[in-house]
Image (cartoon, helix red, strand yellow):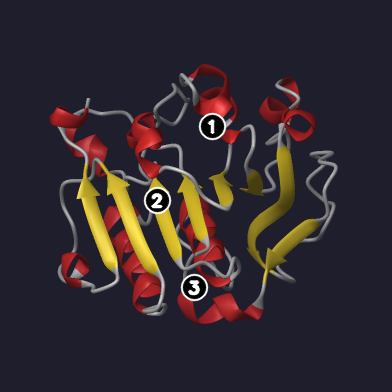
């Protein structure tokens, strides 16, 4: 059985140990602070095959370089959260020693056409989730650290480790993120998705998807 564990930056990442072992880890965006500061997270990643889904913001890899991430860990793929042809390969200036892999045309039916790019996902976290489902031959995808900004309704910051944007939601909002997430899960009925999150509110129908198990992490799990 091929198990993929996806890690986002949300506050639920604190409970990463509940995911257990896997064949592939997918990391969403800048998790260098979490790797350095979250107890045992670095050790967990040490023997894993890692796919890094990272946007192309200039300087976006500086944190990873500061912890020597690409030499210390087994990072086998650099995924760019853009449809192939949207961004110019090698234009980020991030100096990552891996070939860039852009999202293929198999992603188009799950993307939106009214966001920043002609075809786009609702954030890098959702793009990383899409990669986990569409490109990794997964039987099971376990997700933690994607909380859909619902945490802001309860006075909890966006990220487990402090960030400049920790109290800001993306312009498309939590409902659209959940809609995109559900579209991806619904489109892959043969893949079991286990979502571990502190999110408490879900769009209509999300909790009824047969191949989606939602584990709401509460105070009892602290």
In which image quadrant can residue 70 be found?
A: top right
Left or right? Give the position of 6 relative to 136. Answer: left
Q: Name the residue under label 1.
A: 44
Q: Tell me the quadrant of the picture where the C terminus can be found.
A: top left
Q: Which of marks 1 and 2 is nearer the N terminus?
A: 1
Q: In this view, does 143 lie to the left or right of 36?
A: left
Residue bearing mark 3: 111
Q: Is residue 57 visible?
A: yes
Residue placed under numbered mark 2 in the picture: 143
Distance from disc 2 to disc 3, alpha carbons, whole Å, reads 19 Å
| Pick the front one: 114 or 32 | 32
Q: How crowded is mark 3: few (under 14 residues within 10 Å), some or many (20 or more)?
A: many
Q: Mark 1 to mark 3: distance in Å? A: 32 Å
Residue at the spot 46% in from the left edge and 19% down from the top edge: 39
In the structure shown, which secondary structural element does the residue marked by tag 3 occupy? loop
Question: Residue 15: x percent and y percent?
Answer: 34, 33
Side of 44 relative to 52 (left or right): left
Are the two marked residues, 1 and 2, in contact with CB atoms closer than 8 angstroms?
no
Residue visible at 71% across and 34% down in the picture? 73
């Amino acid at each position: 059985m091929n198990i993929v564990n996806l890690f986002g930056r949300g506050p639920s990442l604190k409970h990463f140990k509940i995911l257990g072992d896997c064949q592939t880890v997918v990391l969403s965006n800048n998790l260098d602070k979490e790797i350095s500061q979250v107890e045992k997270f670095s050790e967990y990643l040490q023997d894993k095959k890692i796919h890094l889904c990272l946007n192309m913001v200039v300087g976006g890899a500086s944190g990873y370089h500061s912890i020597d991430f690409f030499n210390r860990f087994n990072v086998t793929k650099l995924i760019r959260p853009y449809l192939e042809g949207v961004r110019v390969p090698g234009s980020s200036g991030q100096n990552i020693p891996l070939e860039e892999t852009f999202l293929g045309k198999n992603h188009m039916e799950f993307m939106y056409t009214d966001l920043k790019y002609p075809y786009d996902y609702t954030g890098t976290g959702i793009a990383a989730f899409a990669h986990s489902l569409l490109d990794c031959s997964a039987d099971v995808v376990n997700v933690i650290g994607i909380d859909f900004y619902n945490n802001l309704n309860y006075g909890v910051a966006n990220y487990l480790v402090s960030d400049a944007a920790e109290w800001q939601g993306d312009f498309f909002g939590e409902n659209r993120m959940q809609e995109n997430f559900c579209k991806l899960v619904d489109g892959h009925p043969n893949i079991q998705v286990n979502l571990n999150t502190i999110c408490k509110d879900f769009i209509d129908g999300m909790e009824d998807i047969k191949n989606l198990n939602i584990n709401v992490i509460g105070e009892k799990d602290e």
